[in-house]
């Protein structure tokens, strides 16, 4: 029963379904047989990878069965000349990166959940993460997919080649489709050479304007060697120090904001010289008031842990209201300050962190326990605000169950109608991941 409960409950502990069965196929053919049976018998199915999703997309809402790809972990091939990797959907992201590290390559994707998320889940959510600023989206690095449609049909677009302009690029529809159009069973991806020189620095600053200036100067002075640029506010540093055993701030004092910058290149002298010039410049101009540069990989991991462990640490406050929005970078933090005022007296904390290089804010609000009065202060305000700025109500986590009724804040009625038509074409009986991504309509109940 514990196993069933685990597969029925999402990472945030916010959504819990009552799916009676978890199926763990090992092969594409088994996935195909399962889906054909379910389609013929009108049984709803939720595809599930590592179950690290943050919008309730990978767990049942009612009594859907769970199709877990956790036993599909074969790495099929790697070509060290082209850098193309082909593997099954259940491969854990960190395992793939470890496999590539031994061969001098790396995955073009990295995120805090790397130890348990699976490449199929990453593709299904079009996960962004901390390397997006360097390698771009999975829409560019996924070269081919094998997908099983709800009726059991296997669609194979796996390719050993980088370029292919033969007709519609079908695989793109599945990237970010959150398990609503088909089950990803295999993928081929373009990987990158692993950098031999990596530097990580954590800087403290007094204002959000300084964070924006640090970003602009990093782009200008570090240019092509920048591999990650992230930010967090003082409340994030506090949650690390308060809720994580041994969580510490490596700087000499606490500051209103922190900026984490990583460089990756092939010549350490060149990169270090660039980073030092950047640091001298931002310290001399007062944009940065304190900072530390990791001396070795252990220290680099420790600096990264501060950023990557915020999500887990927030759970220690109680209940987390999590928002993942795209906004113009210069104004990105306004909503955090706004929310602090709106929700005063009802929260443990309101904090902001995220992928500043991509204009992606993670606005998180916590309370001791779920409070509908607080939720009513946050929603729909946060979505209306974001739409008013022409932003996106889901920058990288997807819509899942949480935001299935929110798509209209970021997409036009014509686009949503077309999405319903695509859903009906791929899944006429609506068996695959129902209640997710799209609001219900007559064709998708
Ligand atoms: P799951 O959670 O199992 O599923 C997610 C969705 O994909 C569901 O809708 C599911 O139905 C579907 N799905 C899963 N596998 C398949 C498949 N084979 N075929 C079709 N559909 C499938 N996300 C980011 O974008 N950037 C981040 O930086 C980031 N950091 C995170 C850090 C932490 C600590 C945590 C907990 C989560 C983070 N996430 C991040 C969210 C999450 O990890 C990603 O969305 C991840 O890509 C989900 O992968 P998964 O294997 O866990 O998928
Ligand atoms: C992150 O960037 O840390 C993730 O997207 C997870 C989160 O938003 O909590
Ligand atoms: Zn993120």
Image: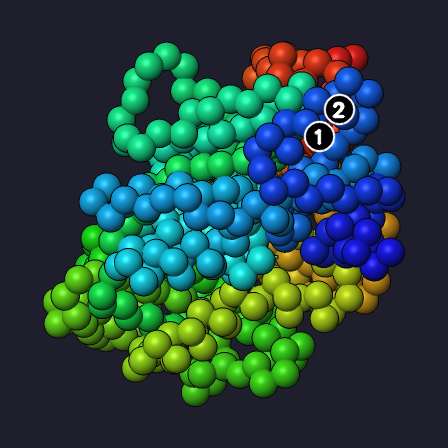
Image x and y of residue 149, in percent: 61, 23
Total tally of numbered discs in the picture: 2
Residue neighbourhood size for the residue with mark 2, other residues' Cα within 10 Å, grouped as few (<14), some (14–19), many (≥20): some
Q: What is the secondary structure assignment of the residue under circle 2? A: helix
Residue 416 seen in this snapshot: no
Distance from mark 1 CB to nearest ligand 1 atom below 8 Å = no
- In the image, residue 84 above or below residue 267: above
Name which residue lies at 24% across and 48% down.
80
Image x and y of residue 434, in percent: 75, 29
Distance from mark 2 CB to nearest ligand 1 atom below 8 Å = no
Q: Are marks 2 and 1 in contact (CB under 8 Å)?
A: yes
Quarter of the image for the C terminus: give it.
Answer: top right
Image x and y of residue 381, in percent: 70, 41
Image x and y of residue 209, in percent: 40, 59
Position of 241 with respect to 187 (left or right) is: right
Q: CA gap, disc 2 to disc 1?
A: 5 Å
- In the image, residue 296 above or below residue 392: below
Q: Name the mark on residue 342.
A: none
Q: Nearer the viewer, residue 393 or 13?
A: 13
Q: Name the mark on residue 34.
A: 1
Q: Nearer the viewer, residue 342 or 261?
A: 261
Where, by quadrant of the figure, is residue 234 drawn? bottom right
- In the image, residue 258 above or below residue 31: below
The type of colouring in the image is rainbow
Q: Which residue is mark 2?
A: 37
Residue neighbourhood size for the residue with mark 1, other residues' Cα within 10 Å, grouped as few (<14), some (14–19), many (≥20): some
Position of 282 with respect to 51 (left or right) is: left
Name which residue lies at 53% across and 42% down.
89
Name which residue lies at 75% across and 21% down.
39
Quarter of the image for the N terminus: give it.
Answer: bottom right
Q: Nearer the viewer, residue 43 or 362?
A: 43
């Amino acid at each position: 029963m514990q196993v069933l409960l685990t597969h029925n409950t999402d990472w945030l502990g916010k959504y819990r379904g009552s799916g009676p069965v978890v199926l763990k196929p090992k092969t594409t053919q088994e996935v195909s047989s399962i889906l054909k049976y379910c389609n013929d018998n009108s049984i709803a199915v939720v595809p599930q990878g590592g179950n690290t999703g943050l919008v309730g997309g990978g767990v049942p809402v009612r009594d859907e069965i769970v199709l877990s790809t956790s036993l599909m972990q074969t790495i099929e091939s790697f070509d060290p000349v082209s850098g193309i990797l082909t593997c099954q959907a259940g491969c854990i992201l960190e395992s793939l990166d470890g496999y590539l590290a031994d061969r001098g390559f790396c995955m073009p994707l990295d995120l805090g959940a790397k130890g348990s998320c699976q490449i199929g889940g990453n593709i299904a959510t079009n996960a962004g993460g901390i390397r997006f600023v360097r390698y771009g989206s999975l829409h560019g690095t996924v070269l081919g997919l094998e997908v099983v449609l709800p009726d059991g049909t296997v669609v194979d677009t796996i390719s050993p080649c980088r370029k292919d302009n033969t007709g519609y690029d079908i695989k793109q529809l599945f990237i970010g489709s959150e398990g609503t159009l088909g089950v990803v069973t295999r993928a081929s991806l373009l990987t990158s050479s692993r950098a031999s020189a990596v530097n990580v620095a954590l800087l403290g600053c007094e204002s959000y304007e300084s964070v924006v200036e640090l970003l602009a100067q990093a782009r200008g002075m570090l240019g092509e060697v920048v591999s990650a640029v992230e930010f967090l506010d003082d409340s994030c540093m506090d949650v690390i120090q308060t809720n994580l055993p041994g969580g510490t701030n490596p700087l000499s004092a606490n500051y209103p904001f922190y900026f984490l910058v990583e460089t990756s290149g092939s010549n350490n002298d060149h990169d270090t010289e660039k980073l030092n010039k950047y640091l001298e410049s931002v310290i001399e101009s007062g944009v940065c008031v304190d900072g530390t540069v990791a001396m070795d990989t252990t220290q680099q991991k420790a600096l990264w842990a501060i950023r990557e462990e915020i999500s887990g640490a927030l759970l220690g406050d109680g209940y987390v209201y999590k928002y993942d929005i795209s906004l113009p970078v210069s104004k990105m933090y306004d909503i955090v300050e706004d929310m602090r005022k709106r929700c005063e007296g009802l929260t443990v904390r309101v904090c902001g962190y995220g992928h500043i290089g991509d204009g992606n804010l993670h606005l998180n609000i916590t309370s001791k326990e779920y409070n509908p009065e607080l939720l009513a202060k946050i929603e729909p305000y946060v979505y209306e605000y974001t739409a008013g700025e022409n932003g996106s109500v889901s920058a990288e986590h997807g819509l899942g169950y949480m935001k299935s009724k929110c798509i209209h804040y970021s997409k036009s009625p014509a686009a949503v109608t077309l999405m319903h038509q695509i859903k009906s074409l791929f899944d006429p009986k609506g068996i695959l991941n129902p209640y997710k991504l799209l609001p219900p309509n007559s064709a998708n109940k």
